[in-house]
Amino acid sequence: MSIKSEISARVYFMYVMLVLAGIAILGMIFRTQQVEGKYWKAVSDSTSTSYRTIEAGRGNIYSADGRLLATSLPFFEVRMNPCAEWLVDSTFNRHIGPLADSLAALVKDTTARYYRNLIIAARAKHNRYLKLTRKPVNFTQLKSIYRFPMIDMKHYRVCITVEEKGKRVNPFKLLARRTIGLARDNNQVGLEAAYDSFLTGQTGLQLMQRIPGAWIPVTDEYAQEPINGKDIFTTIDISLQDVAETALMNVLEKNKADHGCAILMEVKTGKIKALANLGVTENGTYDEIQNYAVTEAMAPGSTFKLATAAAVLESGLADTNTMIDLEGGLKVYGKGFKARDHELKEKVVTLKRAFEISSNVGLSKAAVNAFGNNPQRYFDYLKHFGLFNKTNIDLTSEARPVLHDTHHKLYNRNSTLPATSVGYESQLTPLETLCFYNAIINNGQRMKPYLVEEIRSFGKLVKRFEPTPVDKPIVSASTASKLHAMMEGVVTRGTAKGEIKNINYRSGGKTGTAQIPDAKKGFSEGGSLRHLASFCGYFPADNPVYSCIIVVFDPKAEEGKYYGSQIACPVFRELADVIYASSTNLHTLQPNLRDSSRRTTKYPSIATGAGADLMNVNAMLQIPQMNIEADMWYVGTAVNSGASMKAKTNFGAARVVPDLTGFSAKDAIYIVERLGYQARVEGAGKVIRQSPNPGTPLPKGEIVHFILGMPNASITITDRPKKDSTKRK
């Protein structure tokens, strides 16, 4: 072989070897990436560690009396390793079925077959961090999982990894839900949004290792301990909130309204005690879907007439006794606005009377007569009243009021002044209207409304929010007093007469009924005209403690029934009645409203009942106990004049029928059954006759018949049974 051929052979050999080596390398690359890629990625991940942030526990939200309104409950994400080294096939196959059955029965979100296939597939793919349930489980469910087949085996539980996930819940469900808000990523509302920086807390750091699909802690220790968020204590009274939402719900359902709101505020402080918002859902039920009280600005209607009356009185250009010709119930202002009164029965009235009957003609004429030559002066008064500004309540997304003064591009010199004076060409939120009313009720002093009273961290006070006056009084004391009388007149002899009435307290306020124009056709014929019914008022009138506004949008149950007096007043009355009945401190503020001849210094009567119960009632009402004994039963009606009462024992020995004349059926049945007898009752009222007669020996188990009717006036005191004397049927 020539040298040339030998060299060529060697070159070809080396070339072939290099090609084969390249092919082998490409094959190894393909095998590593495509065949063994997941395995090596898992190995890589298992060696990757990093400091990861740990979310802090979110703070709680409480009501004024310390009840939880929002809190974070612990839920747990459970992951398992179905391919542990000591979990041999025989053991796995024996327990996979019972484990799948147990998971399906516990979580109830899918079938046992789903869990069986999920775990088997994870074992086949060497998934060492399988998410066991679709949703995080609670602590009780977690404890059950630890007792499930396969998981409860010795050595295997260490292959269960649990990661805590906080879930925000509202224990009172619907109550004030929109005010409290929702804690969602990038979409928070209500107090959850306004106080997020306090509630969130400070995140921590923990060294964690990455495995396929998740990060797991390397140790239980933190590089930086997370600090839980602070707790906020609101001004909301959950009991009053419940009453407000229930009353509002009833009115909305009864009148098939679109939505509504109710706000209750303390007059002197500006604290919001209840804030209810309800709107109709797609399925026809009502829910807190939007905070209408704060975010929805609409034409207020006749409730705005208080601002007009305040401006007129403050100007000195008219007084409450200034006479106004109502012109038959129709007054046309240029081509832009018609002031119209419905069902008008009076022709010439005072300004006070025009306000009481909510005359559009009367109030618009009062405004034009006072400010027609200088309309901007009227709007300057409204600015001074704070009606051009937001209330700056501690909630996000408060709508800004809309009013067209003479500098506004939509101002019309013929119509804007008279239209605004009766609640049109303007937009206010219910809260903005209430804050103005509250200022008038508070003798002119405007208060900033607020919902959060304290911020605490582990029980320690961090910040307290105090009542905040807004500037100087907006009206004089004299004007405020006149406006009080006008608002009380609305209730006693005006548009709210008969709708709000309680002999124990007086109240004042103003009804409102606004027409809401069609979005496209406005007030023109053929448009879909809707109404806004409202009432804004206060109670007790002699010493105001609470102000309140009720707004109901688009009531449509009955044609012609959309006035504020018909729709909104019942909610105010129910709320006021409940508050007065449950707040004894209000009673001391009120003079005796009844005729002086009916007043008495005697204590109330004591009705039939157990001595222990009567003692509790007397203690609560601060009535002398009259030697009442806990183990006695008081029968009949005893007028407490301060004299002692003598006890008379007549139960007698065991197996003797006691004298139960004068007892209620409930108490009589309780006593004889505690003595071992059976009871049979006929009629209604109290026991007037019994058989066998009192004192008759009777074995246990026999029947005692009671005839009920009108009791006599005699008083008998008997020994109370000694056994189980604190319980009754």
Image (tube, rainbow, N blue to C red):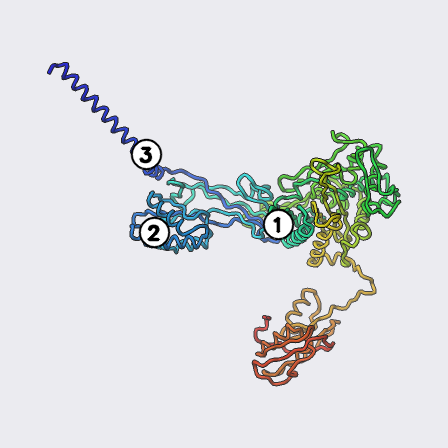
Using the rendered image of the protein, determine whether residue 346 is visible from the camera's viewpoint.
yes
Percent from the top left, x then y, of residue 254?
68, 52
Where's residue 525, x and y in %?
75, 38
Residue 588 location, quadrant:
bottom right
Rendered position, 595 above or below 38 = below
| Spatial separation of the CA atoms under disc 1 and disc 2 | 49 Å
Q: Which residue is drawn at 80% across and 36% down?
A: 337
Give the alpha-carbon distance from disc 3 to disc 1, as whole Å.
Answer: 56 Å
Up-down: is 195 above or below 594? above
Q: Considering the numbered disc 1 on the image, is that residue within a helix, a strand or a loop?
A: loop
Would residue 231 be found to the left or right of residue 523 on screen?
left
Q: How many neighbours does mark 1 have within 10 angstroms: few (below 14), some (14-19), or many (20 or more)? A: few
The quarter holding residue 683 reads bottom right
Crowd rating for badge 3 (residues with CA inside 10 Å; few <14, some 14–19, many 20+)? few
Task: Name the kind of residue labelled 3 in the image.
Answer: Gln
Query: Pointer 3: what residue?
Result: 34
Front-most of 130 and 263? 130
Please state which of the two labelled residues, at mark 3 or mark 1, is closer to the viewer: 1
Left-right relation of 696 to 410: left
Work out which residue is located at the far bottom of the displayed protein and give it.
697
Q: Earlier in the sequence, mark 3 or mark 1?
A: 3
Given the image, on which type of amino acid does mark 1 rest? Thr
Q: How far apart are marks 2 and 3 (CA)?
A: 32 Å
Dot placed on the residue nearer the N-terminal end, 1 or 2: 2
Q: Mark 2 points at which residue?
A: 156
Disc marking residue 494: none
Question: Can you identify the residue that label 1 sits on?
Answer: 285
Q: In this view, does 179 lie above or below 698?
A: above
* Identity, as a three-letter code, of the amino acid under mark 2: Tyr
